Image: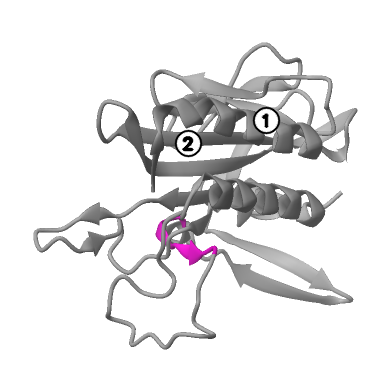
């Protein structure tokens, strides 16, 4: 997808509008702005913004989500878009991502546990399209390991000499359960759209019906809006 560089400012305003709705803060913002030449990220200045640390150890800014309510939020959201120049006045969509963070207690640091990513394809030697990760879905979700470890498991895993197992009690019966190492799931791409119900896929051909890029800024905005609204409805109170 390519657009005029001059269109990016209006696109950022449209994202702001959606974020103000989702965060229930129409009188606050802007929440995102153009960072650098051709990027959109969460901006400083709002009381609903805080610093968080990604799974890769990078510092970024995240917005408060009103879940369970606006006064006691446990979830924070970062949002980024990256574009690149495709000429003097044109820019090309490169990628975007959303990261969801959870805060257990007020004095705890937010922990990243869910990602939504969309990476545009690049051209191969034959002029075809190649997506990052080969047959991986684009767009896609990632589940981070923090979402897979409950408080009992975390306590056991962090204990000295841990054998990575816990006991669960059901009535008078104790069940010993091993803790499965699920760290590999962070590398698994879970498609955020797939046209498998209308198009067959042989498991090898690429790009497949689960790989695409945004058609235009309006399509990308609809995708952002749907994903953000859906997340708020699904998060536990």
Mark positioned earlier in the residue sequence (2 or 1): 1
Residue at the (36%, 51%) spot, across then down: 120
Q: Which residue is mark 2?
A: 81
Q: CA distance from mark 2 to mark 1?
A: 13 Å
Where residue 32 sits, quadrant-wise, is top right
Residue 222 vs 66, above or below: the answer is: below
> 92 or 228: which is nearer to us?
92
Percent x, y for residue 27?
84, 20
Residue at the (27%, 79%) spot, across then down: 205
Callout 1: helix, strand or loop?
Answer: helix
Residue 60 vs 172, above or below: the answer is: above
Q: On the rendered structure, is 13 left or right of 137?
A: right
- The local crowd at label 2, few if under 14, some if 14 to 19, many if 20 or more residues have their Cα within 10 Å, is many
Callout 2: helix, strand or loop?
Answer: strand
Residue 74 vs 204, above or below: the answer is: above
Residue range (magenta): 186-192
Percent x, y for residue 129?
24, 61
Residue 191: say if magenta: yes
Percent x, y for residue 25?
83, 27
Q: Which residue is mark 1?
A: 16
> 37 or 191: which is nearer to us?
37
Percent x, y for residue 180?
52, 66
Q: On the rendered structure, is 67 left or right of 34?
A: right
């Amino acid at each position: 997808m390519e657009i005029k560089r001059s269109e990016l400012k209006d696109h950022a305003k449209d994202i702001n509008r959606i974020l103000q709705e989702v965060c229930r803060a129409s009188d606050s913002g802007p929440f995102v702005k153009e960072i650098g030449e051709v990027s959109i990220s969460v901006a400083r200045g709002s009381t609903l913004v805080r610093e968080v640390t990604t799974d890769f150890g990078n510092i970024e800014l995240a917005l408060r989500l009103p879940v369970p309510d606006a006064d006691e939020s446990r979830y924070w959201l970062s949002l980024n878009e990256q574009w690149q120049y495709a000429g003097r006045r044109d820019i090309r969509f490169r990628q975007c991502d959303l990261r969801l963070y959870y805060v257990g207690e007020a004095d705890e640091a937010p922990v990243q546990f869910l990602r939504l990513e969309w990476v545009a394809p690049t051209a191969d030697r034959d002029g075809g399209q190649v997506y990052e990760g080969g047959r991986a879905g684009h767009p896609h979700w990632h589940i981070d390991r923090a979402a897979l470890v409950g408080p009992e498991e975390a306590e056991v895993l962090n204990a000295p000499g841990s054998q990575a197992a816990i006991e669960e009690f059901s009535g008078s019966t104790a069940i010993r359960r091993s803790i499965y190492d699920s760290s590999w799931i962070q590398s698994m791409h879970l498609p955020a759209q797939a046209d498998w119900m209308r198009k067959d896929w042989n498991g090898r051909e690429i790009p497949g019906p689960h790989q695409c890029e945004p058609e235009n800024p309006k399509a990308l905005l609809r995708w952002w809006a749907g994903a953000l609204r859906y997340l708020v409805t699904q998060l536990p109170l």
